[in-house]
């Protein structure tokens, strides 16, 4: 029997045709498909500007740089996230610190954030930037984050790598109403894919311009942006800052543009599967994902919490039993500061107690739009078999 991964892309004939059409065209990269894809996403989420890059990690990096993150600055993010949400700050020479999570949503806790800010203000160590992560596709409490950012003067990036197609207070995640920049990922396990790819959304013209420059070596070929040089020399481009090659190709963008036709459908299908799980697991000794009524999750991940007081097995035994049944459950995520690299920076066990409890109880079940009825039934029956009190 085939094994079932926790996430998988959903590619149809139209997706394939649109990629093949680009392969047969004149431009494989930097043609007109990247801007079309950017417009498609910015129209969908109602943000003014979109900058497509080769990964969400690259997008996070140039977003930090555009916001002016520098050596010695403090950047805070959630303890439960993918390492990229923290690494981007280190790329800029900043210091990273972690906010513990909310016990219900598993997003960063607003109460703990506020407590930490009060302490930091007293010791003159307020953060320059907060990277709020919409875990599993469910928005953070952005209204509260915005009020705290106004009060304490830090900038905000939304790491919405999980969350395209999700909503907060009825509006699309990515509109940047409560943040400076929002990031999406198009890795194959995410909601829509470009193979590898990411995007930064913003309503700020200057930030968008800087990120466009940074994704391509800090080079411009626009006359009005160039610095004065002798007219007797050929200056058809100028490097104005130290950028990178973080460009997305037209091949990848063509896949993304085609996938955008189905983004709402994908999220709808994910909700249907999550609803089935919620019903089927209502009598199991597990917590199903809590949904804040102000949010509409994109349901990138379906995470259950094991009630280990009522289960006679350990988390790792359950994990291994799923694996041996061919259900490739996962864990999202290990607290970032417990990673050996971060531990060497001096973070200790016990630093974020809620995140560590979550780490020891969470399991991610398969959830993706192309999950068949047969696969779904199999996941449900294996789950009932493996998890019983
Ligand atoms: C996937 C992910 C990223 C990185 O995305 P890439 O496109 O693979 O670079 C960053 N943050 C979070 C929360 C993610 O899940």
Image: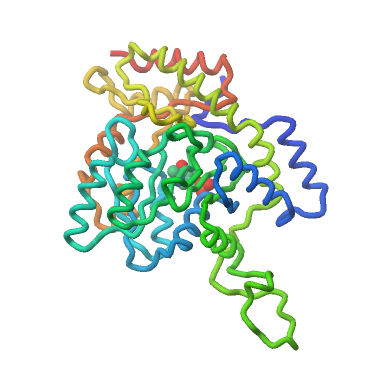
Instruction: Give the image quarter of residue 383.
Output: top left
The quarter of the picture where the C terminus appears is top left
The mark tally for this picture is 0
The quarter of the picture where the N terminus appears is top right
Q: Percent from the top left, x then y, of residue 214?
A: 56, 64
Q: Is residue 173 visible?
A: yes
Residue 302 lies left or right of residue 219; in this view the side is left
Residue 9 lies left or right of residue 125; in this view the side is right
Can you say whether 81 is above or below 155 in the image? Answer: above
Q: Nearer the viewer, residue 355 or 59?
A: 59
Q: Percent from the top left, x then y, of residue 334?
A: 34, 41
Q: Percent from the top left, x then y, of residue 299?
A: 47, 29
Which residue: 53% across, 34% down? 165
Can you say whether 364 is above or below 185 in the image? Answer: above
Residue 138 lies left or right of residue 215; in this view the side is left
Q: Nearer the viewer, residue 375 or 301?
A: 301
Q: Percent from the top left, x then y, of residue 29?
A: 71, 55
Instruction: Give the image quarter of residue 145.
Output: top left
Can you say whether 145 is above or below 224 in the image? Answer: above
Which residue: 24% across, 47% down? 114
Which residue: 61% across, 42% down? 43
Q: Is residue 335 visible?
A: no
Can you say whether 9 is above or below 120 in the image? Answer: above
Q: Nearer the viewer, residue 253 or 316?
A: 253
Which residue: 21% across, 58% down? 121
Please, which colouring scheme is shown?
rainbow
């Amino acid at each position: 029997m085939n094994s079932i991964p926790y996430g998988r892309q959903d590619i149809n004939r139209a997706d394939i045709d649109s990629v093949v059409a680009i392969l047969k065209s004149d431009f494989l990269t930097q043609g007109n498909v990247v801007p079309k894809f950017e417009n498609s996403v910015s129209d969908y989420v109602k943000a003014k500007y979109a900058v497509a890059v080769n990964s969400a990690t690259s997008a996070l990096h140039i977003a930090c740089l555009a916001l002016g993150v520098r050596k010695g600055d403090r950047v805070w993010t959630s303890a439960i996230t993918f390492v990229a949400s923290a690494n981007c700050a280190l790329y800029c020479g900043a210091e990273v610190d972690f906010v513990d999570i909310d016990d219900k949503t598993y997003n960063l806790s607003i109460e703990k954030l506020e407590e930490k800010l009060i302490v930091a203000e007293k010791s003159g160590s307020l953060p320059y930037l907060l990277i709020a992560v919409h875990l599993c596709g469910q928005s953070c409490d952005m209204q509260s984050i915005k009020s705290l950012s106004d009060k304490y003067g830090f900038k905000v990036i939304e790491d919405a790598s999980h969350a395209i197609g999700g909503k907060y207070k009825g509006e699309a995640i990515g509109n940047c109403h409560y943040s400076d920049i929002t990031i999406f990922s198009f890795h194959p396990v995410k909601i829509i894919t470009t193979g590898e790819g990411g995007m930064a959304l913003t309503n700020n013209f200057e930030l968008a311009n800087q990120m466009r420059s940074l994704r391509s070596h800090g080079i411009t070929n626009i006359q009005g942006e160039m610095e004065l040089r002798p007219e007797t020399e050929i200056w058809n481009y100028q490097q104005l800052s130290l950028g990178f090659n973080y460009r997305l190709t037209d091949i990848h963008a063509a896949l993304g543009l085609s996938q955008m036709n189905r983004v709402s459908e994908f999220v709808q299908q994910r909700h249907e599967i999550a609803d089935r799980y919620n019903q089927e697991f209502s009598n199991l000794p597990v917590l199903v994902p809590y949904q804040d009524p102000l949010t509409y999750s994109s349901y990138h991940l379906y995470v259950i919490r094991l009630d280990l007081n009522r289960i006679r097995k350990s988390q790792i035994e359950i994990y291994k039993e799923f694996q041996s049944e061919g259900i490739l459950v996962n864990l999202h995520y290990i607290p970032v500061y417990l990673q050996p690299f971060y531990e060497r920076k001096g973070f200790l066990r016990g630093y974020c107690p809620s995140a560590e409890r979550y780490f020891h109880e969470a399991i991610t079940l398969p959830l993706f739009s192309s999950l068949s009825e047969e696969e779904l039934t199999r996941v449900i029956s294996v789950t009932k078999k493996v998890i019983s009190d």
